[in-house]
């Protein structure tokens, strides 16, 4: 798994904890509850980092930072990967078109159904946006359908192509999430120590 997209870890199993889990079946659920608690704090911090990496976020893509508590082993992860089962959450957001009446240029192509869906994805379904912001993109272009008779000008020598630019990588996720998970592991260790002391009383 790409470490820029998902960070996992948290719990190092200890002898005292394993013994308690063998004698107390409810112990595992209690530990998973603690894992979920510290992961939610990581998620909040990484959501703030995502907000800071974007100029605006009208469809709340920061909510696409995802956490998972593992079932087979004690641990968890934080990621900006897509959900296994998308919502899908739609918003009423419509990008503002800045093309003025009579202005040359601009995107006059009709949006496809897929483009309209992507525009309206909201919240936790916009993980793909966070990955673009985090990792950036290469220069993007588009080929238009050839139109017979379209004239070339000195400023438009390739009338059937278009440049969509590129997204500069912000790299907000990788190192920050690693630090947050290390802090979470320390906090979790303290909470587990308190839990073990209470259970052994």
Image (spheres, rainbow, N blue to C red):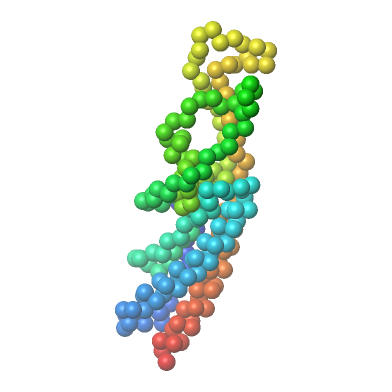
**Residue 16 drawn above or below residue 102:** below
Q: Nearer the viewer, residue 191 or 143?
A: 143
Residue sitting at x 48%, y 44% = 92
Q: Is residue 29 left or right of residue 37?
A: left
Q: Nearer the viewer, residue 14 or 118?
A: 118
Residue 49: percent from left, percent from top: 60, 56
Which residue is at a point 37% across and 67% down the rendered structure image?
73
Examine the rendering and report whether any part of residue 99 can be seen: yes
> Image point 55% across, 57% down: which residue?
47
Closer-to-camera residue (174/16): 174
Residue at image point 51% right, 9% down: 148
Spot occupied by residue 129 in the image (x, y as percentages of width and height): 52, 45
Q: Is residue 195 above or below residue 97?
A: below
Residue 42: percent from the left, percent from the top? 53, 64
Q: Residue 140, located in which quarter of the rendered image? A: top right
Q: Position of residue 155 (x, y in %)?
A: 67, 16
**Front in this rendered view, residue 56 or 145:** 56
């Amino acid at each position: 798994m790409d470490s820029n997209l998902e960070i996992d870890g948290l719990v190092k199993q200890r002898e005292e904890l394993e013994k308690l889990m063998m004698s107390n079946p409810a112990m595992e659920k209690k530990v998973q509850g603690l894992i979920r608690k510290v992961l939610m704090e990581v998620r909040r911090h990484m959501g703030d980092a995502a907000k800071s990496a974007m100029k605006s976020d009208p469809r709340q893509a920061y909510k696409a930072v995802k956490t998972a508590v593992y079932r087979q082993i004690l641990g968890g992860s934080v990621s900006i990967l897509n959900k296994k089962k998308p919502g899908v959450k739609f918003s009423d957001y419509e990008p503002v078109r800045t093309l003025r009446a009579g202005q040359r240029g601009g995107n006059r192509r009709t949006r496809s159904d897929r483009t309209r869906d992507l525009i309206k994805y909201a919240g936790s379904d916009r993980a793909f946006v966070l990955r673009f912001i985090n990792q950036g993109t290469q220069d993007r272009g588009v080929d238009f359908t050839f139109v017979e008779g379209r004239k070339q000008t000195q400023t438009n020598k390739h009338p059937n192509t278009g440049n969509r630019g590129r997204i500069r990588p912000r790299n907000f996720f990788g190192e920050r999430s690693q630090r947050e998970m290390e802090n979470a592991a320390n906090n979790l260790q303290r909470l587990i120590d308190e839990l073990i002391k209470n259970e052994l009383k």
